[in-house]
Image (cartoon, rainbow, N blue to C red):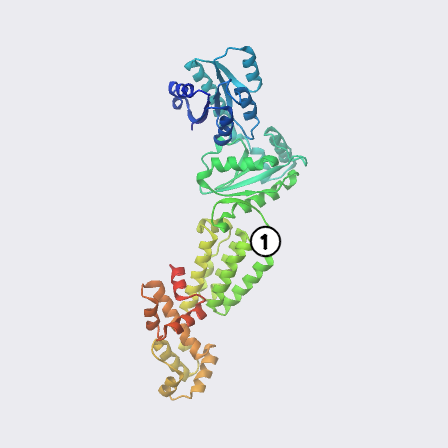
């Protein structure tokens, strides 16, 4: 890891000379930026957060001394300031050191002197990084077992890190959900601990929350998925509750479908429970159109009703539980933690897509009533014929002539034995076949309509949407 350096001088040739005459990388540094004025340098300090700033002292506008003073007041600033001046004036040097400068060097600069300063900075930074794992031990212990002894140790640790959970100050909990193990935590000076395989917890002063979030986002940009932020914590005994809130909020990237900063909101539980009941009824009645309409409503609820990943897990498991009637081993696919859900799907949209396919596949694979389940010998023969010839032009009248049975009686048998009308039963068989062709072939929709036994394309599309809840084209796209 290399530490960042900012070079500041109102003469560009001095900056170029300083860049060229020191092998920065050899000593563990890189020149991350340059500035020709104090004002420009102050903006660069806030932007790149350098570890060391080499600055001239006499510059137009903002002087080097003012730069040191204002730079040191920036939130989470971590830079060491080194003055490089052509003026050997004791008053300047004394004031620079008073403002927090690490050293005062004279121009023309001595390369060995600068190298010695770099080594000093590097030793201090390396030592701080090495101590970083020690920080957070009291916080970790308190989160695991909130004993009085752990509470006292945590209060000491907070004080050492410049944090206070007193009512007039307060802290905030920031939880980061990452795509993998973090690689840049050593550069962060915030109090932090690991709270999951890919989760990090940070504590920051409440009034500097935005700056802390920005620092975390910058350091962990590559793997960052979600940042969850708690409310203001002014009572250490409420810390665990607020961390839980931030932890849940960090996973909201799954619902949003993109990385972001989130806070826990109050969900509309009643609306969610109503939607779950509607979905349960649709699955129980094998009504695929109603199930698809309910899935659309549920997707809108997750957008508008502040639902969380816990609700997504509940939905996933409920669907698997309800589909047990179609296949007995479906419950084996249930998940027992939202972490498993997040590992299995990149977003809520992907999970909903899977559940739609899942419900559609099993509902459409089992519309055919087994003729052997009927105790009526005449109906067994009729149903077997229908199951084998449903793609042909079959009607109640043709069945009546073939099996020498009254048309009204055949209608009654279908309603009694299958629980559906003859027309609806034939339609479900044909639409199921059409769904199979839409999923597995590249045939045009009109060609599929003909193969499924429909001579009228528009009647086919109306029937398809009534049963499936989607147009044939929408269904094909969804099943890809």
Task: Give the residue at x 56% y 23%.
Answer: 69
> Which is nearer the eye, 33 or 253?
33
Q: Secondary structure at mark 1?
A: loop
Can residue 367 be seen here? no
Q: Examine the rendered structure and indicate whether residue 144 appears above or below residue 268.
A: above
Task: Give the residue at x 57% y 16%.
Answer: 95
Can residue 214 be seen here? yes
The residue positioned farthest toward the front in the image shown: 60
How many numbered marks have been drawn onto this rendered protein structure?
A: 1
Task: Tell me the quadrant of the picture where the C terminus can be found.
Answer: bottom left
Q: Is residue 241 left or right of residue 471?
A: right
Task: Tell me the quadrant of the picture where the N terminus can be found.
Answer: top left
**In the picture, residue 301 is in which quadrant?**
bottom right
The residue positioned farthest toward the right in the image shown: 167
Q: Position of residue 181 (x, y in %)?
A: 45, 39
Q: Position of residue 140 (x, y in %)?
A: 56, 37
| Label 1 Cα crowd, 10 Å radius (few <14 / some 14-19 / many 20+) | some
**In the picture, residue 191 is in which quadrant?**
top right
Residue under label 1: 267
Q: Examine the rendered structure and indicate whether residue 382 appears above or below residue 322.
A: below
Task: Give the residue at x 50% y 28%.
Answer: 45
Q: Position of residue 188 (x, y in %)?
A: 51, 32
> Which is nearer the eye, 432 or 135?
432
Q: Position of residue 313 (x, y in %)?
A: 51, 54
Q: Examine the rendered structure and indicate whether residue 403 appears above or below residue 357.
A: below
């Amino acid at each position: 890891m290399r530490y960042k350096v900012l070079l500041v001088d109102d003469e560009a040739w001095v900056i170029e000379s300083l860049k060229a005459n020191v092998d920065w990388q050899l000593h563990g540094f890189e020149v991350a930026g340059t500035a020709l004025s104090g004002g420009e340098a102050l903006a660069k300090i806030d932007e790149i957060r350098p570890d060391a700033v080499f600055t001239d002292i006499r510059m137009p506008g903002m002087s080097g001394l003012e730069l040191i003073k204002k730079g040191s007041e920036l939130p989470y600033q971590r830079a060491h300031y080194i003055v490089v001046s052509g003026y050997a004036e004791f008053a300047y040097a004394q004031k620079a050191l008073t403002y927090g400068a690490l050293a005062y060097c004279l121009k023309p600069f001595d390369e060995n002197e600068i190298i010695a300063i770099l080594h000093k900075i590097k030793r201090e930074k390396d030592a701080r990084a090495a101590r970083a794992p020690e920080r957070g031990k009291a916080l970790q212990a308190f989160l695991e077992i909130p004993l009085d002894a752990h509470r006292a140790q945590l209060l000491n640790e907070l004080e050492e890190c410049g944090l206070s959970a007193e009512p007039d100050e307060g802290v905030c909990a920031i939880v980061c959900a990452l795509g993998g193990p973090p690689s840049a935590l050593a550069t962060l000076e915030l109090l932090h601990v690991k709270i999951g395989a890919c989760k990090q917890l940070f504590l920051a002063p409440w009034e500097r929350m935005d700056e802390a979030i920005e620092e975390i986002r910058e350091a962990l940009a590559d793997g960052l998925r979600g940042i969850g932020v708690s409310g203001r914590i002014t009572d250490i005994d409420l810390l665990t509750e607020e961390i839980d809130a931030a932890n849940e909020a960090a996973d909201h990237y799954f619902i949003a479908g993109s990385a972001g900063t989130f806070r826990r909101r109050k969900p509309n539980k009643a609306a969610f429970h109503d939607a779950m009941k509607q979905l349960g009824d649709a699955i129980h009645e094998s009504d695929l159109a109603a199930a698809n309409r309910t899935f659309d409503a549920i997707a809108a609820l997750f957008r508008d009703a502040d639902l969380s990943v816990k609700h997504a897990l509940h939905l996933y498991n409920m669907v698997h539980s309800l589909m047990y009637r179609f296949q007995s081993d479906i419950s084996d696919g249930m998940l027992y933690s939202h972490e498993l859900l997040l590992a299995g799907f990149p977003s809520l949209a992907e999970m909903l897509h899977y559940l739609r396919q899942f419900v559609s596949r099993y509902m459409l694979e089992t519309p055919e009533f087994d003729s052997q389940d009927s105790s009526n010998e005449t109906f067994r023969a009729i149903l077997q014929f229908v199951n084998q010839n449903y793609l042909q032009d079959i009607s109640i009248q043709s069945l009546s002539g073939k099996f020498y049975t009254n048309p009204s009686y055949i209608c009654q048998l279908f309603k009694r034995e299958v629980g559906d009308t003859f027309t609806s039963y034939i339609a479900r068989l044909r639409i199921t076949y059409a769904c199979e062709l839409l999923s597995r072939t590249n045939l045009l929709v009109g060609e599929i309509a003909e193969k499924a036994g429909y001579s009228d394309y528009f009647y086919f599309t109306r029937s398809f949407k009534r049963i499936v809840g989607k147009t044939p084209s929408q269904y094909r796209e969804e099943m890809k």
